[in-house]
Amino acid sequence: MRLVTPNRKAVREALAQEGWRFALANSLAEFKRHQDSCRKLWLPTGSESDNRVRSIRERVLRSLPWELRGQSLPRWLSYVSKSARKRLQPNMPIAADFCLIHGFIFLVGEVWGERRGGVWRLHRTDGPAVVIKDQELYFWYGWQVSKETVLDPPTAERIIAEQNQTEREVLLQRMGVETFVREASLEPVDSFRDSVLLKVNTAQKQHRWNGNESVEEPVSLAFIKVVCPSTQHVHFLRVEPQVASAKQALESTLPGFTRDWQKDLVAET
């Protein structure tokens, strides 16, 4: 959902009675020009309101990338009165800086977010989650990814060929584990009763020490195929790629247990 709307008029009206000078920037280039050409000051904590995040919007804006930040977000908000801070929420500037010539310089833009697991994060499924006049940033539940990762249809071939772990995880979330397993060519590595451990190598490489030398090997995706004893439905669970056997993969799906398949799983059935 849209959390912040870039309304310059609303920002000016909210800050009109604060008693200090300020300027508004529509683009990141304009904001950077102020940072490069003006004499900046790093502000101490103000006393008009709290030096901490107080709303969902403020918490989401605090997770913006470093290239969009100026002054620390809760710190510059401590110079805004509580009433103005409340009025500013729907049109909250996404970044701020302070110089001796213009006072505060605010960067305005559009921000989208979504709640997942009780936590709000930058997220948008059909476009950029952060929109400025000269830049668009794409996020998937707080992870910054490319435009293609968010908008293009995910395929098993693209997931296997992706070398960036974050991009690959987002593509896998969009596609779904069961769809990926059925479309990708996964090799059975081991079996234990009705369960089968499946793995596939990706294009990403990693190094590990083997004795006294560093060995390069591909990063794998691993899944355990399990069958529900009641409905006989087949399910695929994601497991750590380091697991070597199907029994070990089953045990890894039991957090908080003793990780002994014979003791835990059999005792539950």
Image: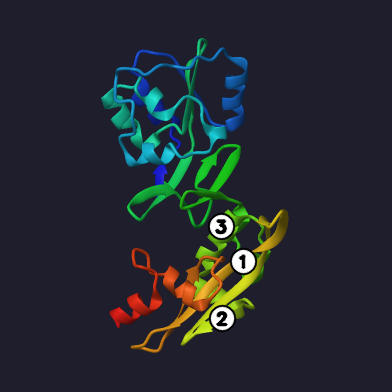
Q: Nearer the viewer, residue 108 or 137?
A: 137
| Comes first in the chain, label 3 or label 2 | 3
Label 1 environment density (alpha carbons within 10 Å; few <14, some 14–19, many ≥20): some
Name which residue type carries label 3: Val
Name which residue type carries label 1: Ser
Label 2 vs label 1, nearer the camera: 2
130 with respect to 216 (left or right): left
Query: How many discs appear?
Result: 3
Of helix, strand and loop, which one carries label 1?
strand
Q: CA distance from mark 3 to mark 1?
A: 23 Å
Across and down, in percent, residue 93 comes to 44, 31
Picture disc at residue 190: 2
Of helix, strand and loop, which one carries label 2?
strand
Picture disc at residue 56: none
Point 51% across, 43% down: residue? 130
Label 3 vs label 1, nearer the camera: 1
Q: Nearer the viewer, residue 27 or 42?
A: 42
Name which residue type carries label 2: Asp
Across and down, in percent, residue 260 comes to 39, 73
| Comes first in the chain, label 2 or label 1 | 2
Disc 3 designates what residue? 150
Across and down, in percent, residue 225 comes to 49, 80
Picture disc at residue 220: 1
Q: How is the image coloured?
A: rainbow
